[in-house]
Amino acid sequence: QVQLVESGGGAVQTGGSLRLSCAASGDAYRRDCMAWFRQAPGKAREWVASVGSAGGTTYADSVKGRFTISRDNAKNTLYLQMNSLKPEDTAMYYCAARKTICVGAYSYWGQGTQVTVSS
């Protein structure tokens, strides 16, 4: 099994920055691919970014150039550096993991951390 615990959320003003962290535990092979998702009130959950076991990354167009996903396998931690934040980035942010490649449904989810961006 895999456990994921997010932290680092908070309230910032437009243009500010936050760094989210996701502490992972459990079988490493079950979290080859790790990702961040977000869900705003009244909206569907959306994928934000993914990172594979070798470090390859992909981003949603809405965050490309502003957010950076990274992982420290020695620390079993996933990060999301968020810069130039906008009010539309306000959401609950979730860490997720799955085996093998970053395609398909994710098997493991954290409880989420809230990010609020005010104008």
Image: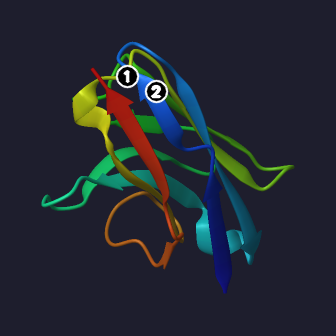
* Mark 1 crowd level (few <14, some 14–19, many ≥20, 10 Å Cα): many
Q: Residue furthest right?
A: 74
Residue at 47%, 35% in the rendered image: 11
Image position, residue 48 (x, y; %):
34, 44
Please give left or right for residue 34 compared with residue 65 in the image.
right
- According to the picture, the residue beneath numbered tag 1 turns out to be 85
Q: Note whether 32 is above or below 67 in the view shown.
A: below
Q: Quadrant of residue 104?
A: bottom left
**In the visual, does 108 lie left or right of 73?**
left
Mark 1 element type: loop
- Residue type indicated by callout 1: Leu
Residue, disc 2: 12
Q: Residue at x 37, y 54 (%)?
A: 37
Q: Are marks 1 and 2 in contact (CB under 8 Å)?
A: yes
Residue 26 x/y as whole percent: 75, 78
| Residue 93 in view (yes/no) | yes
Counting labels gives: 2
Residue at horizontal 32 percent and vertical 27 percent from the top: 118
Label 2, secondary structure: give it: strand
